[in-house]
Image: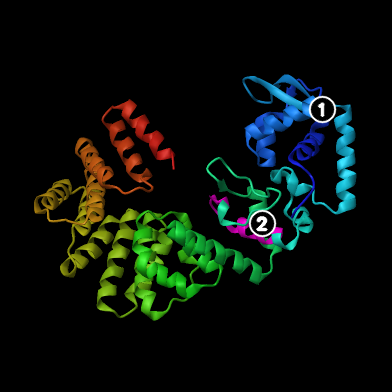
Amino acid sequence: MATPITVGERIVLHLAQYSKHSNDFDAPFEVSQDGIGEALRISRAHAAIELKKLKEAGTVTERIAHIRAGPVKRKVYFLSESGESKAMNLKDFASRQGIEISPLLDLKKCKGEDLWVQLNSDSRSLIAKAAVFRKPFKRSALPQTTVSLLPEDKEGMAELPEPLRASIPALLDKNALRGAHSFAADYWLKEGDYVERLHHLLQANRTMEAQMLLSTRGWQMARSAGPELLESLKGIGDVLPRYAKEVRRIKGQVALRNSDLKFGHQVAQEMLLTGDPAETVDGLELKGRTLLMEGKAQAALDDLLEVKRTKPSPLLDCDIAQCYGLLGRKDEALQLIESIGRRGGIEDPDMLEEVYYRKGQVLASINRSQEAVANFSKALGLARPGDKREIYKAMSSCYEKLGMEDKAREYSRKAIKR
C-alpha cells in the first residue's frame, strides 16, 4: 500500500482531528509526543523530530498543557492556521488519488468495516492474519508495508486493537479465515506456544495435527492449563481412536485445573464407558477428584480408595488425605501425608512439585499452616515458569491464619499478577 503521504503529513492529518480542543485547559493525550507516536505507530523520538520540522515550518504550534487525567504538564501540539489549510489540501489530494487515510491514522479509532473497504488485497491479507492472533506476536512475521498498519512496541511485538480483532474475522470468507488461522498456527509452532497453536489448528480445520499435538504435548500443556486450553478441548469434536484415550486424559486434567466440575464429570463418564480396564480406573480417579473438588468427601474417598487398590500413587494418597481432612479424620490425614515423605523415591520433578502442593493443601485444611507453607515453598522451588497463582493464593491464606499480615499481602499481590 505505497503512498506519497509522508510521516510529517500523517501527523498533520492526525492533529486535524483534535483542532476543536486547541483552547482546552486539559489537552487530549493524543496531541502529546507520546500520544502522536502511539497513534501513528512511530517512536516518540521520530515524532519529536517530525514535530520540530512542522513547528519550524509554521504548520503546528506548541504549548505546555495539562494532559487529561494526568498529574503533570506536557508539550502538546495543534495545527496553526496554515496547518489547517494543509490538512484540508491533504484530504483533497488523498481523495483524488484514492489514498487510504484511515489506516494512516489511529487504528484504535477505525471501525473494522470502514478500514476493510479502504485496504488493497495485500493489506487485507496482512490485517486478516494479524486479527486472528489472541496474543502479541513478532511484527517481523508479517510482510512490511510502506505505511505502518500494525501498532508495534519497542520489542518489535505487534497486536491489533481489540475492536478490530473482534470485527475483522467476521468480514473474511471461510477460506481466508482458515488461512489466517493456519498462518498463526505455524507461527506459534516456531515460538513453542502449543496452547495457541492448538487453538489456531482447530480454527484452521487442521484437526489431525491438533490431535497429534495433544498426543505429544498435551500433558505438558495441561500442567499450566488456563481457560484458553479448556475452551479448545471443549470444542475439539470427534477424535480419532488412536488419540482418543490420551485426549480424554488431558481433558480431565484440564477440567480439574480450571475447576470445571461439570466438564470433569462428563469426561470421567466417557472414560468409565470405554471398556478399557486401565482407562476405567483413570475415569474413576477423575470422578473421585471431581467429587472432592465439589466437597463430597465421602463419595470421593470411596472412589479413590477403589483406585488405590490397582493404581497406588503419591498424588492419589494426597487426595485421599484431603478427603480424611474434610471428614474430620485429621490423624489419618496427617499419618498418610507423613508416610509420603518417608517413602521418597519420587524422581520426576513435576510430580514432586504437585505432591508438595497437594500436601500443603492437606496440611492447610487441618490447620497446620506453618507446615503447609513449607510444602508450598518447596513446590514453588520446583515449579517451572508458568501460572503459579494457586500456590500464591494458598500461601497467602496460610500466612493470614498465622497472623503474618505483611506476608499474606505479599503473596496475595503475587496471586493477582499473571
Residue under label 1, please give it.
57
Residue 49 point in image, percent of width and height: 69, 30
Q: Which sits earlier in the primary sequence, circle 2 or circle 1? A: 1
Few, some or many residues within 10 Å of mark 1 (<14, 14–19, 20+): few
Q: Is residue 359 visible?
A: yes
Q: Nearer the viewer, residue 367 or 277?
A: 277
Q: Nearer the viewer, residue 395 or 179?
A: 179
Judge whether 155 appears above or below 2 on screen.
above
Judge whether 333 appears above or below 271 on screen.
above
Residue 394 point in image, percent of width and height: 32, 41
Quarter the C terminus occupies? top left
Q: Is residue 315 left or right of residue 114?
A: left
Quarter the N terminus occupies? bottom right
Quarter of image, res 177? bottom right
Residue 416 point in image, percent of width and height: 43, 38
The mark found on residue 135 in the picture is: none
Where are the magenta residues, as a range? 123-139
Few, some or many residues within 10 Å of mark 2 (<14, 14–19, 20+): many
Amino acid type at circle 2 is Ile
Q: Residue at x 54, y 72 (%)?
A: 205
Q: Residue at x 29, y 47 (%)?
A: 383
| SS category of the residue bearing label 2 | helix
| SS category of the residue bearing label 1 | loop
Residue under label 2, please give it.
127
Q: Residue at x 65, y 70 (%)?
A: 174
**Marks 2, 1: nearer the viewer:** 1
Q: Is residue 220 left or right of residue 329?
A: right
Q: Nearer the viewer, residue 292 or 255?
A: 255
